[in-house]
Amino acid sequence: DTSLDDLHIFFEVIKKNSERLIRMVNTMLALERIEMGTSEMHFTNTNLSYLIAESLTYFQLNADKKRMYFNVNIPNNLTVRVDEDRIKQVLINLLTNAIKFAPEDSEILIFAYPEKEYVVVEVWDEGPGVPPSDHERVFEKFYKSGDKEGAGLGLAICKGIIEAHDGIIGVNSDGQNGSCFYFKLPCPDRSRESFSHKSVHSTEQHRLLEIARRITSPC
């Protein structure tokens, strides 16, 4: 006979699988809307450095657990015109993957800088890397590497979001010595003075950038 404890475990498994399926369906629907151009976007001039710093502080606890540390190389102010929530979603996905695939006691590098008509963000990790033959496939729906958990939709979402911003996303890796996932966003239609390294006006943003830089030493 099945005990009450067994039934409880059984229904918990069903509940978790149902929740996972619902999340996957919602993610697929969101991706379809992005790809079709029907997803609502709210573009504003934004300090990308602040979004990066905010995302890094969110992940510090997870990094500590794996004895990883972030090496952050970002200026105080990189102005872009983006949907803040969507770009933060891209940053979170890339940082999640870096922490997931990188070994313990390793370093994750984050760079951001202006390059011609783009602002570039790079996330480097010391994980197993992505074979050159998979550099395009890694951004396809349901692509998975190894036995890590996930639906294989995170990078597809990133690709849809960046392309909706008229940007570029890609990966550099030899498949053996880590990976560099990067994305490029168009510069706003104004002077490159937007990219000076002067301090941002917001006290809150300035403090958060300093916090992000302080987490660049090993834990």
Image: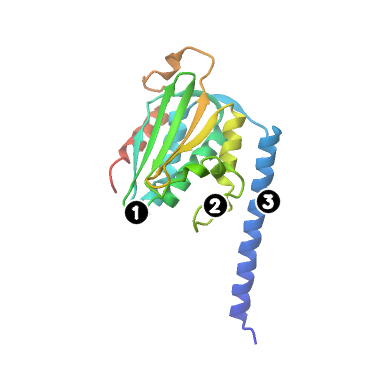
Tell me how far mark 2 sits from mark 1, CA to CA.
21 Å
Identify the residue at image location x=63%, y=62%: 17
User: What secondary structure is found at the residue carrying circle 3?
Assistant: helix
Which quadrant would the N terminus be assigned to in this image? bottom right
Mark 3 or mark 2, which is nearer to you? 2
Identify the residue at image location x=45%, y=32%: 121
For marks 2 and 1, the one nearer the N-term is 1
Q: Which mark is residue 140?
A: none
For marks 1 and 3, the one nearer the N-term is 3
In the image, residue 116 sits, relative to residue 108, either above or below, namely: above
Give the labeled residue for mark 3.
25
Few, some or many residues within 10 Å of mark 3 (<14, 14–19, 20+): few
Give the labeled residue for mark 2.
144
User: What secondary structure is found at the residue carrying circle 2?
Assistant: loop
Give the labeled residue for mark 1.
104
Residue 155 is at least partly visible in this image: no
User: What secondary structure is found at the residue carrying circle 1?
Assistant: loop
Residue 134 versus residue 170: which sits nearer the camera? 134
In the image, residue 206 sits, relative to residue 17, either above or below, namely: above
Name the amino acid type tagged 3: Val
In the image, residue 171 sits, relative to residue 23, either above or below, namely: above
Residue 192: image location, x then y, percent: 45, 14
